Image (cartoon, coloured by chain):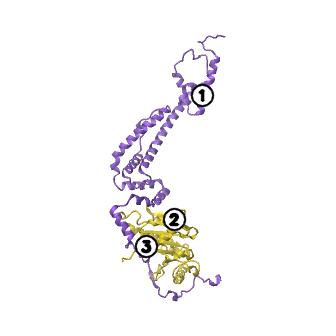
């Protein structure tokens, strides 16, 4: 049987001003390049769409006609996302969209059918504690920026917590090797660790040589 | 307990916990992007694309897909120009706007005739001067907008509102403002004439009035007002004015009854 496409779900964890959103905008750039290279007329209109929940208004330049900018008041955002195919969804501070931290059936559908519909999802959070427990069942790919808080915050929130706790120590050490000004000058190449739990690979990205 | 559990964030890495993890220290952003594999499609996607290639996109599918919200919001928040430019792109991408000029000209001409007829009916009712089709001089922009709306009606492209409604709005805004300005200017003109007449102490209308039958018309009667309101009845623009005029008429008649005219014999 032919291997089906994944429909990635990546969680980006990091403290404020560590470069999470900048990193996500670069992924959005990559997505836009991808859809530029495709003849969109040969696809239905719900293909190759970018959807963002963008509290900082950092993705407005990346959105094109027909893309979706989710509003906090929008209750049907999941239903809209479920209509997308071969698309990228970026939710910055996604928990705001979930009243009472409840994952409704539409969101669970989105997570379950993301591979079938070709929807890649990137969730951005400040702290591992903000990852809902049920969500952690679906995630095995993380981008780890410098994160405030202690190691315990990973427990029960991520799969392979022991690994991520160790990797957190690595990225924290890297972050602390810069002054605040030096860190700002790294823009847009901020250091982070990309950990893929499926094949247990950790890649240190933009680290000092 | 919490304090005991707390560990400072600068703990040294425990290599034991990373056993089995492949670590690459020279990773790049491309490593992350490579995770997104766009070349493998699921069965659902393959079926949908096959159906799309066979039958094209159905209107139902378009309607059920409500992602135009963003484009509208963005253009609205920027400015109206961008809305127009995005519409221009839609129509002009097809490279056919020039093809619609002839038919659009005809439709606009017919519409103008209908509108002139309707407007003149309104003006006549208000006892104002009629207008002609020449009063609808359009700017190049207005003309282009009308043609574009017509092109949309013919082509039914991705308009947000129905194209017919857009044409109606375009016509309404183009002609509605024109008509209202014409009517206003006419009313203002009439009002100015009336005011001038009041200042001079005589009404131009009064001068044109033929003397009435002596039996009814009393020369000896001199009204207390300089203006002959009876003859400028048509410029009464409000109920108040109309009521005031009626009262004056009534007073005048009462005076006429008290003062017998020349033609009548005083039986007392």
Q: Residue at x 47, y 57 (%)?
A: B72
Q: Secondary structure at mark 3?
A: helix
**Label at residue A57:** 2
Chain B visual colour: purple
In the picture, the disc for residue A177 is: none
Q: Are marks 1 and 3 on the same chain?
A: no
User: x, y percentage for residue A105?
Assistant: 51, 69
- Colour of chain A as rendered: yellow
On-image quarter of the N terminus of chain A: bottom left
Alpha-carbon span between mark 3 and mark 2: 28 Å
Mark 3 Cα shell of 10 Å, populated few (<14), some (14-19), many (≥20): many
Callout 1 touching callout 3 (CB < 8 Å): no
**Mark 2 burial class by Cα count in 10 Å: few <14, some 14-19, many 20+:** few
Chain holding disc 1: B
Q: Chain of mark 2?
A: A
Q: Position of residue B173 (x, y in %)?
A: 46, 45
Secondary structure of the residue carrying numbered label 2: loop
The residue that appears at 53% across and 88% down in the rendered structure is B14
Q: Nearer the viewer, mark 1 or mark 3?
A: 3
Q: Is residue A37 visible?
A: no
Image position of B49 (left or right of B268): left
Residue A179, image x, y percentages: 55, 77
Identify the disc placed on residue A115: 3
Number of the front mark, 3 or 2: 3
């Amino acid at each position: 049987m032919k291997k089906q496409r994944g429909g990635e779900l990546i969680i980006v964890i990091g403290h404020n001003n560590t470069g999470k959103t900048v990193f996500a905008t670069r992924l959005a750039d990559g997505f836009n390049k991808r859809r530029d290279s495709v003849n969109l007329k040969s696809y239905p209109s719900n293909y190759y769409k970018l959807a963002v929940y963008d509290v900082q208004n950092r993705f407005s330049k990346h959105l094109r006609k027909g893309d979706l900018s989710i509003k906090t008041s929008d209750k049907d955002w999941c239903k809209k996302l479920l209509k997308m195919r071969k698309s990228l969804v970026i939710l910055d501070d996604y928990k705001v969209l979930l009243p009472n931290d409840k994952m409704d059936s539409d969101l669970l559908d989105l997570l379950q059918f993301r591979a079938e519909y070709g929807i890649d999802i990137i969730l951005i959070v400040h702290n591992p504690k903000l990852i809902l427990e049920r969500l952690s069942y679906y995630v095995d790919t993380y981008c780890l920026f410098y994160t405030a808080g202690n190691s315990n915050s990973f427990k029960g929130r991520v799969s392979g917590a022991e690994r991520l706790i160790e990797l957190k120590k690595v990225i924290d050490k890297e972050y602390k090797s810069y002054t605040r000004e030096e860190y700002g000058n790294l823009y847009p190449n901020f250091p982070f660790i990309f950990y893929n739990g499926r094949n247990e690979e950790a890649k240190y990205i933009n680290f000092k040589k | 307990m919490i304090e005991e559990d707390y560990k400072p964030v600068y703990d040294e890495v425990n290599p034991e916990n990373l056993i089995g993890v492949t670590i690459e220290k020279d990773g790049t952003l491309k490593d992350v992007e490579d995770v997104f594999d766009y070349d493998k499609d699921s069965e659902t996607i393959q079926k949908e694309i096959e159906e799309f290639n066979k039958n094209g996109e159905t209107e139902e599918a378009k309607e059920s897909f409500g992602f135009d919200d963003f484009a509208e919001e963005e253009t609205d928040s920027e400015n109206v120009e961008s809305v127009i430019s995005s519409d221009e792109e839609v129509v002009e991408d097809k490279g056919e706007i020039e093809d619609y000029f002839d038919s659009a000209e005809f439709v606009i001409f017919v519409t103008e005739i209908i509108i002139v007829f309707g407007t003149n009916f309104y003006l006549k009712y208000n006892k104002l001067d009629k207008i002609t089709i020449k009063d609808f001089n359009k700017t190049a922009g207005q003309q282009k907008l009308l043609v574009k709306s017509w092109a949309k009606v013919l082509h039914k492209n991705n308009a947000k509102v129905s194209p017919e409604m857009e044409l109606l709005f375009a016509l309404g805004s183009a002609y509605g403002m024109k008509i209202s300005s014409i009517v206003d200017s006419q009313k203002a003109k009439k009002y100015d004439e009336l005011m001038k007449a009041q200042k001079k102490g005589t009404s131009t209308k009064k001068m044109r009035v033929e003397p009435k039958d002596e039996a009814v018309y009393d020369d000896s009667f001199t009204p207390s007002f300089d203006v002959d309101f009876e003859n400028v009845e048509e410029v009464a623009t409000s109920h108040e004015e109309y009521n005031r005029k009626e009262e004056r008429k009534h007073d005048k008649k009462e005076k006429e009854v008290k003062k017998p005219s020349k033609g009548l014999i005083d039986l007392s």
